[in-house]
Image (tube, helix red, strand yellow):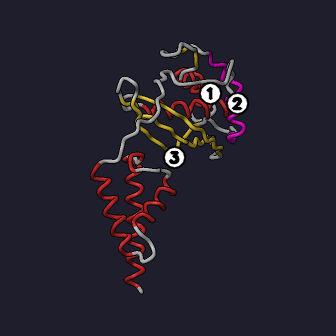
Amino acid sequence: MAETGRKRMNIYESISKCMEEIGAVSKDAVNKQQGFKYRGIDAVMNAINPALVKNHVFIVPEVLEQQRQERTTKNGSVLIYSICRIKYTFFAEDGSCIEAVTVGEGMDSGDKATNKAMAIAFKYACFQVFCIPTEEMKDPDEETPEPVTPQFVPASAEQMHKMGEFVSAYAEMCEDAKESDIWGKLKEKYHFSGTSEISAEMAEKIITQVEVWYKGKKNKIEGA
């Protein structure tokens, strides 16, 4: 039977009511690699769900920004590293809302890096909005793969050849610059002293940059 004559709470009243009903979440989960205890996402969801339902609050996530990288461990396996910046909007039944933006980081050897990042971001949003009691603020992932420095992948022979062609073609169009001048400009811009220091990723940026210079110069000449 529908409730009648009840005033619909705004988001501030609803959040306050939720805070009264959400108790402390203990650190019962254990990190498999480092052995410390932490509060898992399931414990947080179980703690907040009854209060959210009772006070008619729901939460909508929106990923504002995501960064993904592949990292190789010492034993040669590949880890996916994901960082997500997420906005959580907390709505009350009267339509009022508040927003909280948090950042989550996650690593996984499969397809769960983004899931882990989103879980971390959600936990911290709830911890901070509802002020859920904890013994300490440190709250990492359940699994913490060994962090490694991104592996250097040198530019391929094809990339080096393509860079040389673009630099040569661009130099031919410039009356006041030689190939050595263009390479000098690239070294200053991308911070390398020799071609052996050019990574595959940097090579793509250099190729794109010289192509932009080349097309810009060509359009300028044709329009003159």
Residue at the image point whose x is 69% and y is 42% from the top: 10
Q: Name the residue under label 3.
A: 65
Identify the mark nearer the N-term, 2 or 3: 2
Q: Name the residue under label 2.
A: 17
Residue 113 drawn in magenta = no
Residue at the image point whose x is 60% and y is 35% from the top: 56
> In the structure shown, which secondary structural element does the residue marked by tag 3 occupy?
strand
* Distance from the alpha carbon under mark 3 to that under mark 1: 30 Å
Left or right position of 17 against 223: right
Whether residue 126 is visible here, answered yes or no, is yes
Question: Is label 2 in contact with label 3 (beta carbons under 8 Å)?
Answer: no
State which region is magenta. Answer: 9-26
Relative depth, front residue between 54 and 114: 114
Identify the mark nearer the N-term, 1 or 2: 2
Q: Name the residue under label 1.
A: 51
Question: Is label 1 in contact with label 2 (beta carbons under 8 Å)?
Answer: yes
